[in-house]
Amino acid sequence: MRRAVDRLRRPQVFGSAGYPVAGAMVTLSSSVDEHTHDFLEVAVVLAGRATYLSPLGPRPIGPGAVTAVRPGQWHGFAQPDRAVIGNLYLGEELLHAELRWLLEIGDLGRFLLRGGLADGHLSATSRDRVRRRLTELAELTATPGTADAIRATGAAYGILAELARVPLVTDGPGGLSGAVRQTLLLLARRPAEPWTVARLAGEAGLSVSHLHREFRAQLGLTPMAWLAKTRAEVAASLLLQTDRPVGWVGRQVGWDDPNYFSRCFRRAYGMSPTTYRQRYLRQPRSS
């Protein structure tokens, strides 16, 4: 029998006005429903084994496995065998603010931006360090502009430093170029803009073909495909964060036509915006 998780949306994790960094360790005594978040989650298997459920299909995972779940993506766990999962929760906006420089480090940035199951595994020593940092984070309820916000960011850096020690995404060059980082920032901050590749290339100071090649090589998508991904993630978060009509959500991300919004969203998540909201916007139960 599966259980519902008790951390699905930002206020439940960070508090109503909390600093968007938090952590927890969860012992899985039973399977966990497929669920989604409106924040970025990095999960490390600290001990035991389980079957990891995601859009790519079920995968067996064991000690040291690392996953990143982007806002709007779903995941779950089945058949846990004494599995202990360490979770780092991050507001996506931090990747384009305080944590922006991490996008330059190896393939860590690509892993956090793309999500999925990492190619490498953390060693026992790294898992112990992650456990200590998560214990520190679990004791904090940080608010912006406080010493605890500094402590929370430091603990997150410590966890991410352990991830940077192992190969995370091996299908391309490590790190992201300045032009790609600049373009990602523009799309993250202003997803509703009527962007074109030519306009983005002009902002980055590159030719259209050059920007297109850099995106393909470093992220596996074209700039416009990345824009669609960003819009879908923001829309998915808004569907969970608000009770505003679906058409309103589409307009906030630049998809003014409800039918076009529905088609684009279905392409990203395999279901309509309405179905997505009905499936994942539920009151969580205690485990």
Image: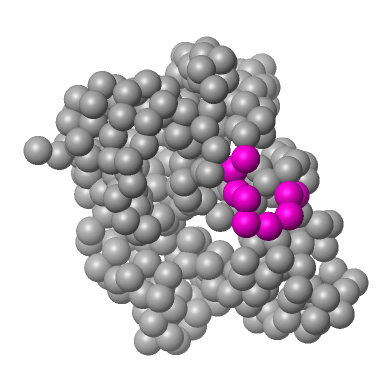
Residue 118, position in %: x, y? Answer: 52, 43
Query: Where's the N terminus, which quadrant?
Result: top left
Which residue is found at the position 23% from the left and 26% from the top?
A: 81
Q: Is residue 195 above or below residue 157?
A: below
Which residue is found at the position 65% from the left and 62% from the top?
A: 219
Residue 190, picture quadrant: bottom right
Q: Is residue 73 visible?
A: yes
Between 243 and 232, the residue placed more toward the observer is 232
Q: Is residue 251 above or below residue 276?
A: below
Please tell me how many numbered marks the rendered image carries: 0
Which residue is found at the position 71% from the left and 66% from the top?
A: 217
Residue 151, position in %: x, y? Answer: 64, 18
Query: Where's the C terminus, which quadrant?
Result: top left
Between 65 and 13, the residue placed more toward the observer is 65
Task: Single out the residue that lies furthest toward the right.
Answer: 205
Residue 112 sits inside the magenta stretch: no
Between 228 and 146, the residue placed more toward the observer is 228
Left or right: residue 56 versus residue 28 is right
Q: Is residue 93 visible?
A: no
- Magenta stretch: give its range: 167-175
Left or right: residue 152 versus residue 56 is right
Left or right: residue 78 versus residue 219 is left
Secondary structure mostly taken by the magenta-highlighted segment of the chain = loop
Left or right: residue 215 versus residue 245 is right
Q: Is residue 6 above or below residue 281?
A: above
